[in-house]
Amino acid sequence: MKILVLGATGATGQQLVRQALSQGHAVTAFARNAGALPKDEKRLRVVVGDTTLDAPRIAEAVSGQDVVISALGRRNSFKSDHLIERSMQAIVPSMERAGVRRLIVVSAFGVGESRRDAPLIPRIMFRVLLNDIFADKKAAEDRVRGSNLDWTFIYPVLLTDGPVTGAYRVGEHLQLRGIPKISRSDVAHFILAEISNRAFVRKVAVISY
């Protein structure tokens, strides 16, 4: 499988790249700085660029792929700079022109209607700290929903740096309590499985322990 990972040097992006390579996939990693990516890996191709500025580089990276995975994010910032929305304005047309239909986007639990399913403490955090970040993700999702792509939005709960367990729950809605968590490595594990399973095409997938 030929997989393009956008935001490949972020914490989740690095997990996606490592696990995809370990499973034998051919990976194209798109990032602004390639320093954190594996070296001397024959099945890894690196494209350096900015998803909000470099439309030709995005088109180059998208061409010939089987699936595009967006792990773009603002890391520890609470200001979105409209990063995801601006990126999708370039990514979606590039995919449509190239005939690449499968897009998996790592979003966040609490975006859009999922906020209603959040336990009390996370719901307060969303309102106080993450309104701008989540508004950007929602605008980006709206852009994707208006396309003809076979999209999936991944809604992980609070992310940790734990190991792959495979012992997680996934659904369009989950019963959650307290402050639910999920490791980035398990998020990557599920995403790579979803490429073949296609159980959540044009659906939201909430993932939690």
Image: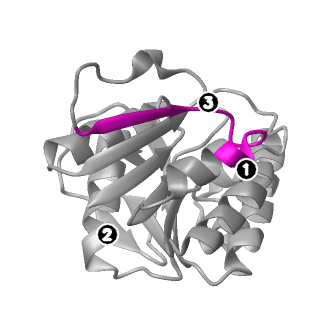
Q: Is residue 179 visible?
A: no
* 108 or 50, nearer to the observer: 50
Of labels 1 and 2, earlier in sequence is 1
Residue 165, compared with residue 101, is above or below; it is: above
Horizontal side of residue 180 vs 31, given as left or right: left
* Residue at the spot 33% in from the left edge and 49% down from the top edge: 188
Element under disc 2: helix
Residue 106 x, y percent position in the rendering: 52, 54
Residue 160 x, y percent position in the rendering: 40, 35
* Residue at the spot 71% in from the left edge and 67% down from the top edge: 93
Give the amino acid type for the residue marked by disc 3 in the picture: Arg
- Which numbered circle lies on residue 154? none
Q: Which residues are magenta?
A: 43-56
Disc 1 crowd rating (10 Å Cα; few below 14, some 14-19, many 20+) is: many
Residue 139 x, y percent position in the rendering: 80, 63
Element under disc 1: helix
Separation of marks 3 and 1 at Cα, in angstroms: 15 Å
Q: Which residue is mark 3?
A: 75
Q: Name the image quarter holding residue 193.
A: bottom left
Q: Which residue is mark 1?
A: 87
Disc 3 crowd rating (10 Å Cα; few below 14, some 14-19, many 20+) is: few
Residue 31, compared with residue 196, is above or below; it is: above
Separation of marks 2 and 3 at Cα, in angstroms: 24 Å
Q: Which residue is mark 2?
A: 194
Give the amino acid type for the residue marked by disc 2 in the picture: Glu
Query: Quick check: marks 2 and 3 in contact, CB under 8 Å?
Result: no
Q: Is residue 110 visible?
A: yes
Quarter of the image with the C terminus is bottom left
Frontmost of labels 1 and 2 is: 1
* Residue at the spot 67% in from the left edge and 71% down from the top edge: 116
Give the amino acid type for the residue marked by disc 1 in the picture: Ser
Of labels 3 and 1, earlier in sequence is 3
